[in-house]
Image: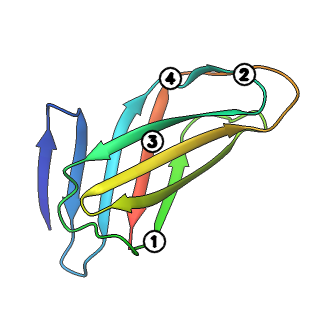
Amino acid sequence: SKSFKKTNNSFLWTKHNDGLITLSADYAPASIPPNTQVERIFNDVYGATLGMSAIATFDKFLSGVQMWAQVTADKQVVAYFRNGTPNTVTIPSGLIKVKVI
């Protein structure tokens, strides 16, 4: 595996020999109003190409907020947090992990 620390985007990027790419970053989604979404964009993800699949996790309870990730362009991955509840949801700071396969 190769591992690079991206200090300008503050995330850890690892490309494994089997082609799997893993990303991790501290993130503070804060308060998300009803029926809105926030996102964390990962740029310069070498090896990620449009059409690849992405799986996202967060290490804090999401209180009904949905989370997913997708490769939106070559070398770009976006993790989304969507609040479909009728109330504003506040999520504490935590760690996002995304796998690109």
Picture quarter with the N terminus: bottom left
In the depicted structure, whether residue 48 falls above or below residue 30? below
Mark-to-mark CA distance, 1 and 2: 28 Å
| Mark 3 residue type | Ile
Q: Residues within 10 Å of mark 3 (few under 14, many from 20)?
A: some
Residue name at image x 77 percent, y 19 percent = 88
Number of the label disc, if any, that sits on residue 33: 2
Q: Secondary structure at mark 4?
A: loop
Disc number placed over residue 93 in the picture, else none: 4
Cα distance in 3D space between marks 2 and 4: 17 Å
Circles 1 and 3, Cβ within 8 Å, touching? The answer is no
Q: CA distance from mark 3 to mark 4?
A: 10 Å
Q: Nearer the viewer, residue 61 or 11?
A: 11
Q: Left of 79 or right of it: where is 77?
A: left
Q: What's the amino acid at mark 2?
A: Pro
> Element under label 3?
strand
Is residue 97 found left or right of 30 in the rendered image? Answer: left
First in sequence, mark 2 or 3: give its number.
Answer: 2
Tally of numbered tags: 4
Q: Which mark is in front, 1 or 4?
A: 1
Q: Is residue 31 left or right of residue 46?
A: right
Which label was assigned to residue 96?
3
Sequence-first tag of 1 and 4: 1
Rendered residue at 11%/50% (across/down): 4
Q: Would you call the spot at circle 4 few (<14 residues within 10 Å), some (14-19), or many (20 or more)?
A: some
Q: CA distance from mark 2 to mark 3?
A: 20 Å
Could you tell me which residue is drawn at 25 percent across and 78 percent down?
19
Q: Position of residue 50 (x, y in %)?
A: 35, 70
